[in-house]
Amino acid sequence: MRRVRKALTGPLAVGVLVAAVAGVGFGLYWFQPWKLWQDETVQEALPGAVATSAPPTAAGKPSAPAGTPSPAGPQTRASGELISHEHATSGTVKLVRLADGSHVVRLEDLDTSNGPDLRVLLTDAPVKEGRVGWHVFDDGEHVSLGRLKGNKGSQNYALPDGVDPARYTSVSIWCDRFDVSFGAAELARA
């Protein structure tokens, strides 16, 4: 018994302790478990959706209700409801054409878990329920629209110049670190 105690108090014990501390430090960096309890809420208005009152008609009454967007304003081209994959996820996804001709992916009422390295992907992959749908979104053609701004709220993600939105059929909240979808929505054309 004395021999075992002596071996554990020498250089071997120091080496095991250093390896354990390094392993815990790497695990905390890689998994970032505290993010599961931290929510980031982001509330952005839709670009170009400015509520203005309509000009009055000859009778002095507004020609349209206040806040009605003009026909040249933002137009929803496709939309879908988020389904859960690796983490419980809900909300609405819209592909919106702005008055200037550019497009944004809009997440409305998003509610998902926070996590390390979350991205918004516009993809051509089909949305599949269950575990079979967790890993498909980076297999085909996809465009990363950037880091997820917050795991709750309503947010806008601009499509880069030259991206044809008609080529893509779904949106995923994608964890780039673990190559897994937190949730996804199939885009149904309006």
Image (cartoon, helix red, strand yellow):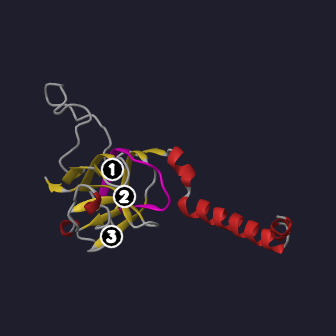
Q: Using the rendered view, name the quadrant where residue 171 is placed.
A: bottom left
Q: Residue beneath label 2, please?
A: 157
Q: Which disc number belongs to residue 143? A: 3
Mark-to-mark CA distance, 3 and 2: 11 Å
The three-letter code of the residue at mark 2 reads Tyr
Between tags 1 and 2, which lies in front? 1
Mark 2, Cα crowd under 10 Å, few <14 / some 14-19 / many 20+, is some
Mark-to-mark CA distance, 1 and 2: 8 Å
- Name the N-terminal-most of marks 3 and 1: 1
Between tags 3 and 2, which lies in front? 3
Q: Secondary structure at mark 3?
A: strand
Badges 1 and 2: C-beta atoms under 8 Å apart?
yes
Residue depicted at x 19% and y 70%: 167
Which range of residues does the magenta coloring cover?
104-120
| Main SS, magenta residues | strand
| Looking at the image, residue 37 lies above or below residue 127 | above
| Looking at the image, residue 136 lies above or below residue 188 | below
